[in-house]
Amino acid sequence: MAQETVAAAGNTEVPAYLALVELGYSVDRVGKEGGERWIATKGALELVADRPLELLGLCLLRSKRGARWQAADSEIDEYLKRFYPTDR
């Protein structure tokens, strides 16, 4: 089977938006001081990001980790150890 690669690019923005809508989110684009923000809302949950693809990432984060989505200190330490090891 051939390897499939999906990269974050312009062609992923519309599918990300469509996935959010399919998941029941209301999605809006808000222009602000020369920039823009994207907001997805579903009930009392509001996700805010720079692009629809980032919104979809936040949606998955919240879905997988729940209301207590923040990382524990031990999880942060493990992440830093793996991806940013110090030279000793």
Image (cartoon, helix red, strand yellow):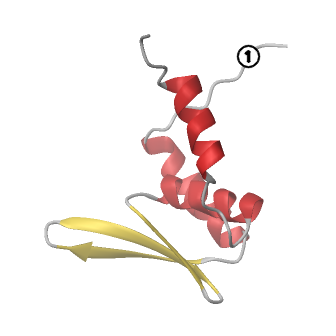
Pick out the residue farthest to the right.
1
For residue 34, which quarter of the picture?
bottom left
Q: Is residue 77 left or right of residue 51?
A: right
Q: Which residue is mark 1?
A: 3
Q: Nearer the viewer, residue 73 or 64?
A: 73
Residue 79 position within the rendered picture, expressed as x and y whole percent measured from the top left: 58, 35
The residue lying at 60 percent from left, 60 percent from top is 70
Disc 1 packing (10 Å; few <14; some 14–19; many ≥20): few
- Across and down, in percent, residue 26 comes to 57, 80
Q: Amino acid at mark 1?
A: Gln
Q: List the single residue furthest toward the bottom.
A: 44
Q: Residue at x 64, y 71 (%)?
A: 21
Above or below for 3 versus 15: above
Residue found at x 61% / y 31%: 6
Q: How many marks?
A: 1
Residue 80, x across and y down, in percent: 52, 32
Residue 88, above or below 7: above
User: Looking at the image, is 13 positioned above or below residue 8?
Assistant: below
Q: In terms of image quadrants, where is residue 24?
A: bottom right
In which quadrant will I find the N terminus? top right
User: Residue at the location (53% across, 25% down)?
Assistant: 83
Q: Residue 15 location, x and y as percent?
A: 60, 53
